[in-house]
Image (cartoon, rainbow, N blue to C red):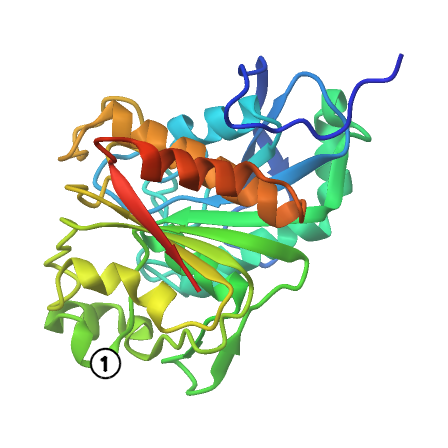
Amino acid sequence: MTEPAYTADPSSSPTPVLSVSPVVLPTPGRAVDLQLRVSAPVTGNDLPVILLSHGQGYSNHLSSLNGYAPLANFWAAHGFVVIQPTHLSSRTLSLDPDTPGAPLYWRSRAEDMQHILDRLDEIEAAVPQLLGRLDPSRVAVAGHSMGGHTASLLLGARLTDPDDGTEANLADSRIKAGVLLAAPGRGGDAVTEFVAENYSFFLTTDFSTMTTPALVVAGDKDSSAHLTVRGPDWHTDPYFLSPGPKSLLTLFDAEHGLGGVAGYDVAETTDENPERVSTVQRLTCAYLRSELYPGDSAWQAARDALTADPNPLGRVESK
């Protein structure tokens, strides 16, 4: 008997997960080779793929292939193959600050994801338990904080390269849907002087070209005062300033950590809340399932359950 194809269901019992790291892709022209963690359910075929982009924090290892276990583990246990690169911005690499693109490597981050999609066959070969089990036609991207910025570029957002004044278009048509978690909003007068002086690429972010379907997740207490003068609403810009179809999940009383999505029991999660993390897990999983498999009812069911909860942890709106 053959194994069933895609079986992701956020309401189902989790499947045991296989996680392999580091998977190393030799990458000429990059400061170091690209290192990945690959997590997948131990059963199932025709598995969809989520590319997960880490953010930037003061912990060393969360901003690497070793972070975001609460999301990667849940998604993999519910039928996705999750691929996590260590971007050049990771503290684990300790690159020379004069390396081109430093310190946040906004362009290289998006290019990392494109390298992964170009070389899925190599990744399968490096993880024999995955061989022949991926569905490369069903790919999503997700990212938290700076990772949300990376994901937005792959979904179609653009910016002006501060080094040469050209418009950067890093959209990838192989990516069919996205999840932006506490992602940065627009630039201009919305960002602080610190951002304008140190991360000038943020100044010109344009969401009007971000046409790929996406779920934006924002905390209504995520002030991010070092980044924006706007307050929590800044993180909703990817929803309000982009064309549909888009959805927005606003989490009540959530700060930048969204309850703890970056890791288990980490110090910088100022709003630690396992129930909130569970809400993010279930709704993001349901959203991606329905986007990658049109006609699937998981997203509507998850929205209905959130609305019916007498003490909901958030609300959803769509356009």
- What amino acid does circle 1 point to? Gly
Camera-side residue of 247 and 300: 300
Residue 273 horizontal side relative to residue 286, left or right: left
| Placement of 302 over or under 7, stated as above or below | below
Camera-side residue of 5 and 228: 5
Q: Position of residue 166 (x, y in %)?
A: 47, 86
| Placement of 59 over or under 162, stated as above or below | above
Residue at figure coordinates x 19%, y 41% from the top left: 254
Q: Work out which residue is located at the far right of the displayed protein and give it.
A: 1
Q: Disc 1 on helix, strand or loop?
A: helix
Image quadrant where one finds the N terminus: top right
Residue 49 appears in which quarter of the rendering? top right
Residue at figure coordinates x 78%, y 40% from the top left: 121
Residue at figure coordinates x 45%, y 62% from the top left: 152
Q: Position of residue 154 (x, y in %)?
A: 53, 62
Q: How packed is label 1: few (under 14 Cα within 10 Å), some, or many (20 or more)?
A: few
Q: Position of residue 86 (x, y in %)?
A: 46, 41
Residue 223 horizontal side relative to residue 53, left or right: left
Q: Position of residue 11 (x, y in %)?
A: 50, 23
Q: Is residue 61 visible?
A: no
> Which residue bears the numbered disc 1?
188
Camera-side residue of 208 and 310: 310
Camera-side residue of 316 and 31: 316
Residue at figure coordinates x 21%, y 69% from the top left: 198
Q: Is residue 81 visible?
A: yes
Image quadrant where one finds the C terminus: bottom left
Residue 117 horizontal side relative to residue 155, left or right: right
Residue 267 horizontal side relative to residue 61, left or right: left
